[in-house]
Amino acid sequence: MPRFWRRNRHWMTPALLLLPGLILFSLVILAASFETVWISLLDWDGIGAKTWVGLANYVELAEDPQFYVSLKNNIIWLLIFMLAPPIGLALALIVNQQIGGMRILKSLFFVPLVLATVTVGVVFGWVYDPTYGLLQLIFGLFGGTAPALLSDENFATFAVATAGLWPQIAFCMVLFLAGLNNLNEDLIGAGRVDGARGWRMLRHVVLPQLSQVGFIAIAVTVIGALRSFDMVAVMTTGGPYGSSTVLAYQMYEESIFSYRFGYGAAIATVLFAIMIVFIAWYLRGLIKAERSNA
Amino acid sequence: MSSVELRKVDKHYAGYHALKAIDLKIEKGEFVVMVGPSGCGKSTLLKTIAGLETINSGQVVINGHDVTREEPGDRGIAMVFQSYALYPHMTVAENMGFGLRMAKRPKAEIDAAVKRAAKILRLEEQLDKRPKQLSGGQRQRVAIGRAITRSPEVFLFDEPLSNLDAALRTQMRVELSSLHAQLGSTMVYVTHDQIEAMTMADRIVVLNKGQVEQVGSPLELYANPANIFVAGFLGAPRMNFIEARVETVGAASLTLTAAGMPAFAFGDIDPVGISAGDAVTVGIRPENLHVLERADAGQASFPGQVRLVEHLGRETVLYLDASPLQATNSDSGTGNFTVQLNKVSPISVGARLTAGFEIAGAYLFGPDGRTLTSRKPVPAT
Amino acid sequence: MPDVSEDAKLQRALYVGGVTLVVALWLLPLFAVMLTSIRSNEELMAGNYWGWPQKFSLIENYTAVFEQTAMLRFFLNSLLITVPSVIGVLILSTLTGFVLSRYPFRGSNLIFALFVGGNFLPAQIMMIPVRDLMVRLGLYDTVYALIVFHIAFQTGFATLFMRNFIAALPGELFQAARAEGASPFQVLRHVVVPLVRPALAALAILTFTFIWNDYFWAIVLTQSDAVKPVTAGLNNLRGEWTSAWNIISAATIFVALPPVVMFFLMQKHFISGLTMGAVKG
């Protein structure tokens, strides 16, 4: 036995070391995700018997006006979130200077990133408060009255997504700063020798080198917009009258509040199907980038 | 009983035949250097002996035991790596005692072994330092010390000097040779540097494309390369080659022509399998090329123009353009000859001259690269 | 800095001043919340929301948070959930990362891809089965439900992180250890663990932030105040203390404090970890 172990420990130990993480991850994360697709074909209240209904949940979803509201809101989120990469890049360029005191300013820009989305929700809930909020203060300066953004079905999604933009900009900024840190010094030097300065340097030397990190920022932002849940849950709970729900929130509501687990699972599956397109696109880009770097 | 024996060792990677049925015997106490261009399989072969690479077929035998399926730690080997592979978080003493610690040897024994190795390598003062605080040469010695503490049957060195600067490399070469004399252990050493091979080896194994080209003492390989590959690989500066054609075949000689050269006869040859019209290669070591005052009947000669002159003090190296002669030399490139003169020469760039060589000192290689010239005497050591 | 003309100095000062202004605007919402958290209730009643506070009620407000709300309990719950989760993630991912980077076998790339891919899944896709699983295991509405889930989920990202870090270590260190007879377990203990400490630090702060800030799983897997973490607790508080903005603000700051403090203490680790996580997956 000791001899057997000595000869085989070379592969048996690794197998034993890998198993705990692999089993836990497969069981809780992967198996659960597949199970959801299965549940989406059932009628189930979460406690009682499961009834096979085939694609009925999907058929119902296709006729559910609330689903289209969620889908539309997800698109609005996506469009608003697309502001994060350019703003993040601008801020990154602004703070990327070798000047004393810039370091601490840089860190302060990152703060929204470490705040819980609930915290951001509370903070912005207060900014938007129609009586005492920051927004009212600004409108007040011009003698106006701030609209009650969060209780207005035309504005609620825009207001919530804008709040979500705050940490997302910080995230993009971090990515672009990392990209700026990795700039090829030789190219900058060569650009300088060739007389490129200021805007021309930025346009022709710096930005082309940021294309990979820019791709990452956009991809991460898209995925972030599709995943949005916390802000909606905290700021509007999907209201008023379901006008600000997104797919993730609608799924949660159908399952937890209406006990329609099969239907919720169908929404989750659709959300996942949409996301997988972007995830695949992202992973492909990453692999391509890694290959060209190698 | 030989110390290391490889029997038909074969190794494939995906779509790549790394080692082709290699047979090799290394005697106890021998210092064997495996040399070859990058990608020839020499490092793979060393790791095969170590057990860090598995093989597809064949056997690895160390001290009479078949260790093909044994773990590296159980083979009685110690290995010194190119990057030294010192653990940055351990002191020199901890690095050197690592193997014994892993084998759960008593502390006193570990300390004694570390002290002994440190004494041999003059590392006593450095034992409490971390690798980061050491110079390149000291790190190299710690890596060797780590091997010594395990008192292995066989030491394996994987290009251990390639990260050192030139001066230190020369010094470490001497130290390694004297270490071998002191310990008397079997050492297998891999390098791409033929000077290391020539200076340190009892025997050299020349590898190319996963095959053993030739095995022998340094001087034997230098005097009698088995083929054009070995001839071109060993020796500095490298051998010059001329493309030639066989005109007539004699009993033990050939008459050759080469572009831009009068026909010349090549004696001391085993011409089996060679026929008129075959393409052959003449090999001339740079020290066998001379600048001729006038044509000499005993020598083959050709005109050339000096491209570059290197004054090395006592020696002068000339790079000649000898077109239309079809010449190759891996030091100076296609179309060029390297000539080594044992004196300071006043010849300057642009000069036109006649170069010649004694046919008796030259080599002839057949169409398949095999050496055709008969054995030359090996200088006694 | 030698030889900087007065002109350049002035330009720099102006630049820094400008950027400071941008930062001030950027963090204005947060400053406002901080300011409110030290404002007295009377002042708020009187409508002084933005002026300089006439009276600082820092102590009163925060004491109120501790004494009149369950925030302290939630805070403790968050620690009870986050700390074991982070430790679990570090242990599991060191093991998986070590094996996946140093012991290639048929299918190891596939396993690695599963860890990476799973890391991108939206939480909703696994919500129902995970909740059901926790109910069946009797863990629902206990901190263990969240601990188990967070360890499992973060192991995906953390494996990616640790594998890439260990793969970037010099391969000869591992060959040397093997040649000296170290068993895989000894390699792990004597070579890997000492060398991955910086990566573990970065990973620890990242996963701490992720788990501390989680809201979704907190509301999916817990119900009672006795186990709820701060994020879910804070949101509840908002319902209970509708217009006591000073108390809610103080509670908000209280929730935000640990990750922010961690961030400022280990900023370099945080940023490098986050960038690597995003860039590599």
Image: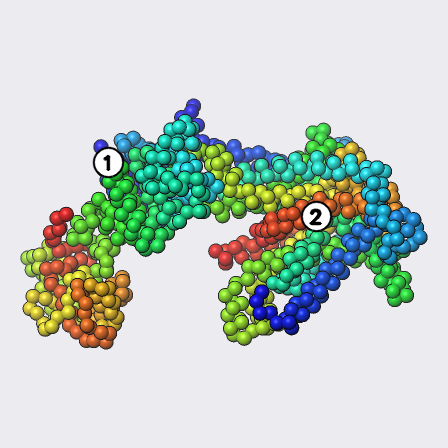
**Dot 2 alpha-carbon crowd within 10 angstroms: few under 14, some 14 to 19, many 20 or more:** many
Q: Considering only vertical position in the picture, is C131 above or below A78? A: above
Is B105 on the left or on the right of C4, as rendered?
left
Determine which residue is flagged by label 2. Answer: C260
Residue at left 66%, top 70%? Answer: C11
Q: Give the quarter of the image for residue B5.
A: top left
Quadrant assignment for the N terminus of chain B: top left
Residue at left 71%, top 65%? Answer: C17
Judged by depth in the image, the label closer to the viewer, 1 or 2, is: 2
Instruction: Point out residue C181 in the picture as x, y percentages from the top left corner.
Output: 40, 34
Residue at left 74%, top 54%? Answer: A164
Q: Nearer the viewer, residue A175 or B359?
A: A175
Q: Secondary structure at mark 1?
A: loop
On what subunit does the disc labeled 2 rest?
A: C
Q: Considering only vertical position in the picture, is C133 above or below C104? A: above
**Dot 1 alpha-carbon crowd within 10 angstroms: few under 14, some 14 to 19, many 20 or more:** some
Residue type, numbered disc 1: Lys
Per the rendering, the mark at residue B28 is 1
Instruction: Point out residue A186 in the picture as x, y percentages from the top left corner.
Output: 50, 65
Q: How many marks?
A: 2
Q: Is residue C265 visible in the rendered structure shown here?
A: yes
Is C55 on the left or on the right of B42, as rendered?
right
